[in-house]
C-alpha cells in the first residue's frame, strides 16, 4: 500500500501532466526563454511547476520546496524537502520529441524517502519508496543482470552549460562505442535513470546535472537493485553535478573507464 507522501506525488504528477499536455499543440509557438545558451524554459515548465507545488502545499503546507524554475539555492536541510523538475527534457518537449518527464522526490533528514518520474509521452510512471522496491505503472522492476560490457547498452547526456571537459568526455564516449553494444542519449536524465532501473540500460553517466534532474531517479535505481555514485565512487552526486549509475557489474565497469579517461580535476568538478 502506498504512503500518503507517494499518493500526493502521484496526484501532483498527474495534474502536472494534464497541464503539460494542454501545451502540446503549441510546441513551436511556446514562448521559449533561455537560462543559458541551450538551457530552455517555457510557459509549460512554469505552469507545471506551479501545479505540482500547489498540490504538495495543499497537503503539506510546511514542507520545503526545491524546484528547478524557482529554486533560490541548492541545499538540503533536515526538514522535509520536495525536489521537483516540472519538465525534465524541455528541449525535447519544445520539439515534440520524446522523452520528457515530471520528476518529484521527497527528502527527509537529507535522505530520499520517495521518488517519482512520469514520462509524459508514453504514460510511464516510475515510483519508489525507500525500502519498498521500485515500480513501473505498479509492476515491480529491477536492474538488468547483464554483467559484461559487450552485452550492455549505456545511456548518457551531453551537457550544455559546462563544456570544459568536452574533449575528455568525447574520448570516453569513443571507448564505450568500441566496448559496449552502444550508447544512447534520450535527452532526459530522469528518464535515463529510470531506464537503468527498468533494465533497459545497464549503466548511465553524465555531468552538469542539477539535484532536480537526479533526485527521484536515483532512489528508483537503488530500490531496483542498482548503484548510484559520483565519478569518484563517492556520494557527492546530488549536488556534485557528476553521476554514474548501473547494475553492480556495469557500474563498476563504467566507473573504472571514467577514472581511466577523465582527469581527477574533471572527475570532481571542483574549481
Image: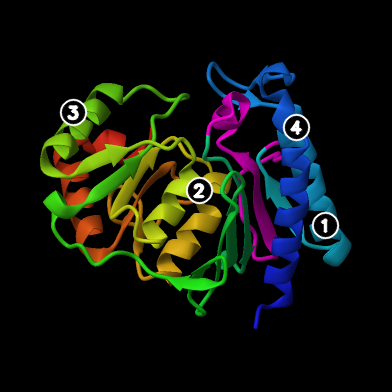
Closest to the camera, between mark 1 and mark 3, is 1
Residue pointed to by mark 4? 23
Residue pointed to by mark 1? 55
Indicate the secondary structure of the residue bearing disc 1: helix
In the foreground, 74 or 23: 23
**Residue 90 falls inside the magenta stretch:** yes
31 is higher (above) or lower (below) than 109: above
269 is higher (above) or lower (below) than 160: below
The answer to the question of whether label 1 and label 3 lie on touching residues, with beta carbons closer than 8 A, is no
Indicate the secondary structure of the residue bearing disc 3: helix
Closest to the camera, between mark 2 and mark 4, is 4
The answer to the question of whether label 2 and label 3 lie on touching residues, with beta carbons closer than 8 A, is no
Q: What mark, if any, has residue 251 been given in the picture? A: none
Residue pointed to by mark 3? 171
Residue appearing at x 70%, y 65% in the figure: 80
Quarter-wise, where is residue 6 in the image?
bottom right
Q: Residues within 10 Å of mark 4 (few under 14, many from 20)?
A: some
Residue appearing at x 22%, y 49% in the figure: 254
Q: CA distance from mark 2 to mark 3?
A: 24 Å
Percent x, y of residue 197: 40, 61
Q: Is residue 236 visible?
A: no
- Dot 1 or dot 3: first in sequence order is 1
Residue appearing at x 20%, y 62% in the figure: 146
Picture quarter with the C terminus: top left
**Left or right of 4 on screen, residue 73:** left
Q: CA distance from mark 1 to mark 2?
A: 21 Å
Q: What mark, if any, has residue 190 been given in the picture? A: 2
Q: Which residues are magenta?
A: 69-97
Indicate the secondary structure of the residue bearing disc 2: helix
Q: Is residue 48 visible?
A: yes
Amino acid at each position: 500500500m502506498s504512503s500518503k507522501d507517494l499518493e500526493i506525488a502521484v496526484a501532483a504528477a498527474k495534474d502536472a501532466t494534464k497541464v503539460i499536455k494542454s501545451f502540446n499543440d503549441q510546441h513551436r509557438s511556446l514562448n521559449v526563454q533561455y537560462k543559458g545558451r541551450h538551457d530552455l524554459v517555457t510557459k509549460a515548465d512554469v505552469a507545471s511547476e506551479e501545479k505540482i507545488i500547489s498540490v504538495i502545499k495543499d497537503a503539506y503546507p510546511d514542507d520545503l520546496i526545491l524546484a528547478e524554475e524557482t529554486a533560490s539555492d541548492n541545499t538540503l536541510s533536515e526538514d522535509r524537502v520536495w525536489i521537483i523538475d516540472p519538465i525534465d527534457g524541455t528541449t525535447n518537449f519544445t520539439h515534440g520529441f520524446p522523452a520528457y518527464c515530471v520528476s518529484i522526490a521527497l527528502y527527509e533528514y537529507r535522505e530520499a524517502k520517495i521518488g517519482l518520474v512520469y514520462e509524459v509521452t508514453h504514460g510511464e510512471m516510475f515510483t519508489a519508496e525507500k525500502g519498498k522496491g521500485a515500480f513501473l505503472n505498479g509492476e515491480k522492476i529491477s536492474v538488468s543482470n547483464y554483467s559484461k560490457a559487450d552485452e550492455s547498452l549505456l545511456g548518457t547526456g551531453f551537457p550544455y552549460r559546462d563544456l570544459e571537459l568536452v574533449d575528455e568526455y568525447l574520448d570516453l564516449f569513443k571507448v564505450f562505442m568500441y566496448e559496449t553494444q552502444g550508447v544512447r542519449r534520450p535527452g532526459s536524465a530522469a528518464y535515463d535513470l529510470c531506464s537503468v532501473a527498468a533494465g533497459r540500460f545497464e549503466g548511465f553517466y553524465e555531468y552538469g546535472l542539477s539535484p532536480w534532474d537526479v533526485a527521484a531517479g536515483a532512489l528508483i535505481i537503488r530500490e531496483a537493485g542498482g548503484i548510484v555514485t559520483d565519478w569518484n565512487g563517492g556520494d557527492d552526486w546530488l549536488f556534485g553535478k557528476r553521476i554514474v549509475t548501473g547494475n553492480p557489474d556495469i557500474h563498476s565497469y563504467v566507473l573504472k573507464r571514467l577514472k581511466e579517461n577523465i582527469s581527477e580535476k574533471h572527475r570532481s568538478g571542483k574549481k
